[in-house]
Image (tube, rainbow, N blue to C red):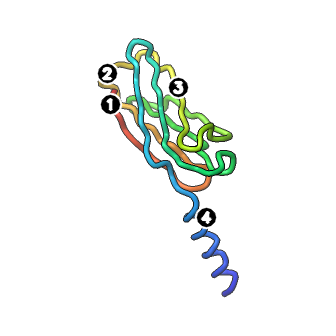
Amino acid sequence: MKKILMILFLFCSIRTFAHPPKSITIHFDPATHILKVTMHHEVKDTVKHFINRIDIVWNEQDAVRQDFAIQLDSGKQEALYILPGAKPGDKITVTSHCNVYGKKKETFQL
């Protein structure tokens, strides 16, 4: 019984301190075809708790999957991608994953 309570306590503790990304914003420059993705994720230690993966689906097709080893900024993770042929009206879905707990998914129209 004590082991079960300890495991339950540890699981709840991890979830208390870990959290999924708060929000995702994107900016697309149609002249350069550069997509800038900003994943807002406040952390104290960017090496132990960070955005570890981003998945981008472009018009229902897998376009990008990138893994990160750390988060470069304690408030956010940013990434730039070139999407040749992207145009206004295209649909982009971004999924951002926290290495400790949770993920955030947002869909945008360029």
Q: Position of residue 77 (x, y in %)?
A: 55, 38
Dot label at residue 14: 4
Number of the front mark, 2 or 3: 3
- Element at label 2: loop
Sequence-first disc among 2 and 3: 3
Q: Position of residue 107 (x, y in %)?
A: 37, 38
Three-letter amino acid code of the residue under disc 4: Ile
Dot label at residue 88: 2
User: Which residue is identified by label 3?
Assistant: 80
- Element at label 3: strand
Mark-to-mark CA distance, 4 and 2: 41 Å
Q: Callout 2: 10 Å neighbours few (<14), some, many (20+)?
A: few
Q: Is residue 18 left or right of residue 35?
A: right
User: Which residue is identified by label 1?
Assistant: 109
Q: Quadrant of residue 26?
A: top left
Q: Residue at x 43, y 45 (%)?
A: 23
